[in-house]
Image (cartoon, rainbow, N blue to C red):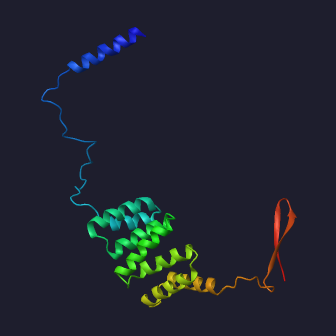
Amino acid sequence: MLKWLGTAGLLLALAGCQTTEGGLKNDRIGIKAPKGTPKITEAVDGLIVGHRLMAAGEYELALRAYTRGAVEHGLNADVLSALGSANLKLGRLKQARTLLNSAVEKDPKSVPAWNNLGVVLMELGEEGEARRVFRNAYALDNGNSDEIRENLRLAIARTEKTTYADPNEDKFELVRRGNGRYLLLTTR
């Protein structure tokens, strides 16, 4: 053990005595880019990067990109809507609601902000308010979006559904068929 410590001490002492010609240089960091690679002189817009990351399902990274976009653009309706959408995908519903409410206050004609606010409200169980919000988004969009139309239809269906069970509704029963297979039958 002592022999090992002595050897390690000697190596450290010799390393400390080593001189470098001209001092330490930091002219290159990492490996060189391949020839023909264009130099990047300006950063890509954080909103564009965030939209691409959202499409790829990378919601946490999208949230970071949207935050960088907020530095470039300020907290305008587009940035607030994007931040709210990322928080919605991450399951942070109250944060999403706050951001999307701010987005529609800043730009009352922002169809994506209204639609995404409606989605948050549906997730929070506020179907009546979501129905009003989807109706607003649908009107602003002039009925051009199938997704908004479907969201409005679902919100209407949920608000008109009665809370009491209808005795005429189908009741389901499972019937075992052997080998772990089941058959689903309806009875009236």
Query: Front-most of 85 and 21?
Result: 85
Q: What is the residue that sits farthest to the left in this orientation?
A: 22
Residue found at x 70% / y 82%: 163
Is the residue 70 above or below the residue 40 in the image? Answer: below
Quadrant of the rendered structure where residue 142 is? bottom left
Residue found at x 17% / y 22%: 19
Quadrant of the rendered structure where residue 81 is? bottom left
Report how many numbered discs are placed on residues in the image.
0
Question: Does residue 45 appear in the picture of this structure?
Answer: no
Is the residue 140 above or below the residue 96 in the image? Answer: below
Question: Does residue 116 appear in the picture of this structure?
Answer: yes
Is the residue 103 above or below the residue 20 in the image? Answer: below
Q: Position of residue 1 (x, y in %)?
A: 43, 10
Q: State which quarter of the image contains the C terminus.
A: bottom right
Is the residue 152 above or below the residue 78 in the image? Answer: below
Looking at the image, residue 43 sits to the left or right of residue 25; the answer is: right
Q: Where is residue 54 in the image (x, y as percent from the top left)?
A: 44, 65
Q: Where is residue 171 in the image (x, y as percent from the top left)?
A: 81, 78
Residue found at x 31% / y 67%: 70
Residue found at x 34% / y 15%: 8
